[in-house]
Amino acid sequence: MLELIASIVVDLSDQKLTAYNTNQEVIRVIRVSTGKASTPTPIFDSKVFTKYRSTTMYGRTYTVAGVPYTMCVSANEAICIHAAPWQENAGQAFGVPRSNGCVRMPMAGARWLFENTAPGTPVSIQA
């Protein structure tokens, strides 16, 4: 039986996302790629505001259509947790800061996280 995630912690120094259950037990740890030094992922406590099975992301220097398994954790949808198939397909490892501020992860981990996380789930991004 699937267990809903009670909270999510993103550790910027370890480049890992940890999902916890209601007993604060670790359910899964996923290697991620967060913001580069020039476009850092902010440190803050938030929640999952919106979820999109697929969405288009816009930045100052990019437009990426069809970004799968996206969960936005800032009210303005500027910071999201999502799959990065382009990174996977290019053979670029996760665990290295590569994004424009979002939290990227492999498709399998992003799909699992998306399917087991409800809107409103607390998210903490820490150093």
Image: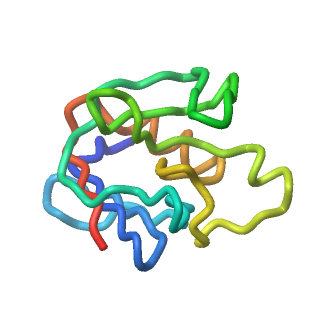
Q: Position of residue 107 (x, y in %)?
A: 65, 45
The percent position of residue 92, horizontal first and vertical second, equals 77, 64
Relative vertical location of residue 1 with respect to residue 75 in this rendering, above or below: below
Residue for point 64% across, 66% down: 94
**Residue under the point 41% across and 57% down:** 41
Please, which residue is most extreme toward the left here? Answer: 23
Q: State the image quarter where residue 95 is shown.
A: bottom right
Question: Residue shown at 21%/55% (left/top)?
Answer: 44
Residue drawn at point x = 67 percent, y = 34 percent: 62
- As drawn, is 80 to the left or to the right of 20? right
Quadrant, the C terminus: bottom left
Quadrant for residue 75, please give it: top left
97 to 48, vertically: above or below = below
Residue 124, image x, y percentages: 23, 56
Q: Is residue 15 visible?
A: yes
Residue 18, image x, y percentages: 36, 63
